[in-house]
Amino acid sequence: MGVIKKGKAYGLVRLNLKLLGVALLCLALGAGALTALGAAEGEGVDVPVVMYHALLKDGARQGQYVVSPAQFESDLRYLQEHGYTTVLVKDLIAYTKGEGLPEKPVLITFDDGYYNNYLYGFPLAEKYGCKFVLSPIGRYSDLYTDTPDENAYYSHATWAQLREMAASGLVEVQNHSYDLHQSRGGRLGVKKLARESDQEYRRMLAQDLTRAQSAIEAGVGEAPTAFVYPFGAFSKATPDIVKGLGFACTMSCEERVSRITRDPESLYGLGRFLRPAGPSSQEFFEKRMGLGP
Ligand SMILES: [Zn+2]
């Protein structure tokens, strides 16, 4: 509870600073400018983003990247009971183009494309009418499509399973690279190597991300609009290249709530909160994410 109070106090301080800024600008620009400025200030919606990976019933496997299906269900119930509406990236893009968003939007994301997301997560999304973004590693979707092996512990979802989820309208499949989800040759995720020229790096990144785009479009029927940074890792040159490839949204692993405005630039570098096993739904959403009860 202490944390929530602190959050509220912080909000008030910030509001006062904003008012002070507006007052100063008002003095400088005159009252006419204040109305326009006020409208711009009031624009925007906070969009908390939750990051899950695997769902497993086996308590011995639960931890940072594995939560139980029961915990995920409890999270969905918490969000629903507290007036949150799950949205997808397409809803955020539509908002930047002038459409509305629910009053309390929340974005649920699953990284890496595990089969257990299909096995446990998708039925729960259907049960609660909740939506989530699923960002598979292209190479593994190919691998498990070619050699089917439905094991909750280690398998990845096939293209047919991803397509089935996307067709429901509850799941949006996004890009998490085709084959850069690793630390190989000194490269972590999509980071640039010191010995790599700008041009080599650009070519390497474009090739991999475009391959994932084509694979997802062929496998699921729709091309991704967002790129989810593997491990949240990127270099100085990365965001511009990703933007240049046509992605409208990128997601990081920085734990903060992002504010979406009508400016399409506000969809880049969205913060996300890792949901580990352990804390109750209330503890996680209210204490870790700072959401109001
Ligand atoms: Zn990942």
Image: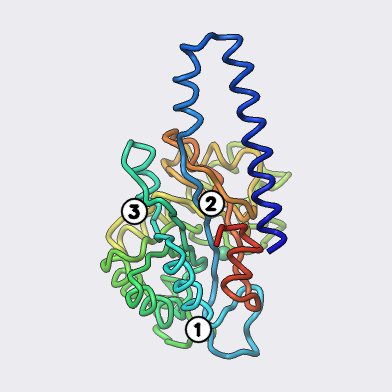
The numbered mark, 3 or 1, whose residue comes first in the sequence reads 1
Is the C terminus in the top left, top right, bottom left or bottom right quadrant?
bottom right
For label 2, the residue is 251
* Pointer 2 or 1: first along the chain: 1
Residue tagged 1: 70
Residue 70 vs residue 252: left or right?
left
The quarter of the image that holds ligand 1 is: bottom right
Q: Residue at x 60, y 43 (%)?
A: 201
Rendered image: mark on residue 223: 3
Instruction: Please name the amino acid that badge 3 sits on.
Output: Ala
* Neighbourhood count class around disc 2 (C-alpha, 10 Å): few under 14, some 14–19, many 20 upward: many
Residues under labels 3 and 1: Cα distance?
31 Å
User: Relative to 137, is 61 above or below?
Assistant: below
Q: Residue at x 66, y 63 (%)?
A: 287
Q: Residues within 10 Å of mark 3 (few under 14, many from 20)?
A: some
Q: Nearer the viewer, residue 74 or 201?
A: 74
Most foreground residue, 131 or 198? 131
Mark 3, mark 1: which one is toward the viewer? 1
Circle 1 packing at 10 Å, graded few (<14), some (14-19), many (20+), is some
Q: Amino acid at mark 2?
A: Met
- Quadrant of residue 145 within the rendered picture: bottom left
Q: Which mark is residue 81?
A: none
